Image (cartoon, rainbow, N blue to C red):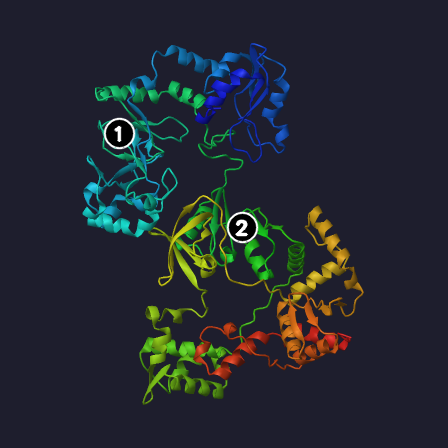
Amino acid sequence: MKREFGKKLIEQFIPRWDLTHIIDTSWANIPGHNTSTAIVFGRHQRPIAPTIRTLMGIRGEPVPPPDPSKGLVWQAILAQIDLPGSESEFITASDSIRQVFHKHPWSIGGGGAAELKEHIEESCDRTLADVAAVVGVFGMTNSDESLLAPAHAFKTHRIEPDMFRPIVAGDDPRDWSIEVSEHAIFPYSNDGLINITSRPNAHAWLWPYRTTMGSRATFDGPTYFEVGRPWWEWHQVALERLSPPLTITFGEIATHNHFVIDRASRVFKQAAPIIKLPHTCSEDDHAGIVGLLNSSSACFWLKQVCLPKGGDQQGGDGARVRSTSGVETHVSHSSLSADERRTAEQAFADGGNCVIVATSTLELGIDVGDLDRVIQIDAPSKVASFLQRIGRTGRRQGSNRNCLFLATTSESLLQAAALVTLWRSGYVEPIQPPGWPIHLLGQQLLALLLQEKSVAATDWEKWLLRLPCFSAISRDDRAMLIEHLVSQKFIHDDEGAWMIGDETESKFGFRHFAEFTSVFTSPPVFEVWHGRRHVGTVDQANFFGSPDRRATLGLGGRSWKVVEISWSGRTVQVIPDEGSAKTRWSGSGKCLGFEMCQAIKAILCNDANPEGLSQRGLERIGQERADFEWLRTAHPPTLQRDDGVIEWWTFAGGQINRRLSEAIAGQETKNPSSDNVRLLVRTTDRCVLRSAIQSLVSGAIPSTPVDADSAPKFSELLPPHFRDRLIRQRLYQGLEREPTAGVLKAMLSNGWPA
């Protein structure tokens, strides 16, 4: 009832309603609701009684109540609603004259606050509006990232001195002084807007932001470009408010009144409104007004009539902070820029009251201090990943490691339960280094030639074969690799002295051979920029599918509207957007291991409940067990569907099932498919399934064509038959190991599939 848009409601409509009760609930604890509120009871008829029962708040809850309905403020409201004239620690109850509530803004503070405010107003013969020439906003840029920077940045770039000034933000006026932290490009003179082309250095500074600034929306809706507004100007500015030179400014959002006299001809953001007195007023007049505005009486009056900006009503945390729900939230994932990620990491390291919404990036060696709790959406695919995440908690003495799983599907619930079961049993996935890394031998050899400029043909083995992974490659394979690298001009052989060849320069020479520094292939991504600020990276798939290839991206916890795409430079210019958006990424589902899938099957086939499940989780597990009751008796676990498809529920994991599917495909069946727990085979001959198992147990690698896209990085250094061999060995690596091989053999010995 203090906002300006409530004025018509209070002064034009409420006088015609029969209000009976007004209850100030701004001090009550309302879960999930931070806006100060009042409850108004009335009837759609002419007023009857001359008074309105009013319950006025005095103070909030000492601590947030476990049950908000049992909070002290609510209990005081219930106890005093029928006791006018009563007063407690939290509420004053009275019958107030109706006409008091016909004037905006309302003041319904208890403990005598409303009466004191009324006394102050009656004692004044003038208001600020009677003595001030202007009270309002000086200007707004609507492009702070483009126009604001520290003074040294402008000086370093030799921005013309008449083009930038110190700018006052809302938190700069404090304790009778102004501490300015930033300056702003202010392209104005006494005659109006300056043509930016007449200031070449300022023009060069702003040019990268031209698209962003020109895409700002005007008050009528179209952009600057569309209506022909100069793209470099401020969104709104009142130049006449720069004179006279003395200005009173204040922080619009603050816990206390901070009014300050400015004598330095600064400019002011919208969060630092200004007061201009008439030209005839002296500096003493300004000082007198500021002294009054900073007084305790003015502070009390302002707290009665100004709208709280989400401030803490239950403690002393300050403006825009609520101890019960004002948690600082950050986002961290690999597609964000380094600066964005460091902000989140630093917030945790500083021990603040904050949450980081993150992908797996924070489990990989980044120190964010001790966490109180990890909340896991669904479940990671490996016990090792779970240990990395839960290991972030419980570091303080006397604290315990803890992780809360929030499963969004039945499959995720089973996976989470299986993961915790494996963890409790002490299982962790074994480390399996990739076998036959002949492509990396080629990469390391070329990197050695790049480093040493030239290496004798007889010396390279002394450098590289010290590594067991390379010395395990047979001499014949190494010789065939060298022959290929020389013949294809990856290596230039100058009478026994090896150097980088022309083909290596052509394929890997970009950016000073930067590709040699990583053995992983990066997805095709675009760099996202907001002016000069690097926001992060996104997959190119976000820009396909619409005629103008425009998109709205979700990045860094907010939405961004794409305004310009450079396909050649693989960059995107964006501006903030008010809506919500999602960013698409290329990828596939999680591949679960054999042990994880077997643990899922054990949960479905046993009656014992996993530890730590909620009641809803136990109920859902019970439903899944009922649906899979047939698993306990079906040997082998196969189902024949009406459409001729056999569902083979192996619970063997994504890798084994995928290889079984490929082995089956080699036996002329129609489009077999697989996931982590089953295969779908279009055949009526179950012997096909048995043959597929036999082929894997025997170690035979299926001869189905390999997907060249699955080749690891640097496989282009290999002869074609080496490349196919590498892909197949990578695909089928691990199938010969226990317990995988043992399970496949057990399938055969038990008559699978019969």
Q: From the image, which quarter does the C terminus lie in?
A: bottom right
In this view, the residue in front, 363 or 675, is 675
The vertical placement of 534 against 469, above or below, is above
Q: Which residue is mark 1?
A: 241
Residue drawn at x 44%, y 22% is 305
Helix, strand or loop at label 2? It is loop
> Where is residue 491 shown, x and y percent of the image?
36, 83
The vertical placement of 480 against 136, above or below, is below
Mark 2 vs mark 1: give the one in front: 1
Residue drawn at x 79%, y 62% is 630
Q: Give the side of residue 82 with respect to residue 479, left or right.
A: right
Residue drawn at x 48%, y 32% is 310
The vertical placement of 331 against 754, above or below, is above
Q: Amino acid at mark 1?
A: Arg
Q: Amino acid at mark 2?
A: Arg
Q: Which residue is mark 2?
A: 395
Local packing at callout 2 (Cα closer than 10 Å; few below 14, some 14-19, many 20+) is some
In the rendered image, which quarter is residue 148 located in? top left
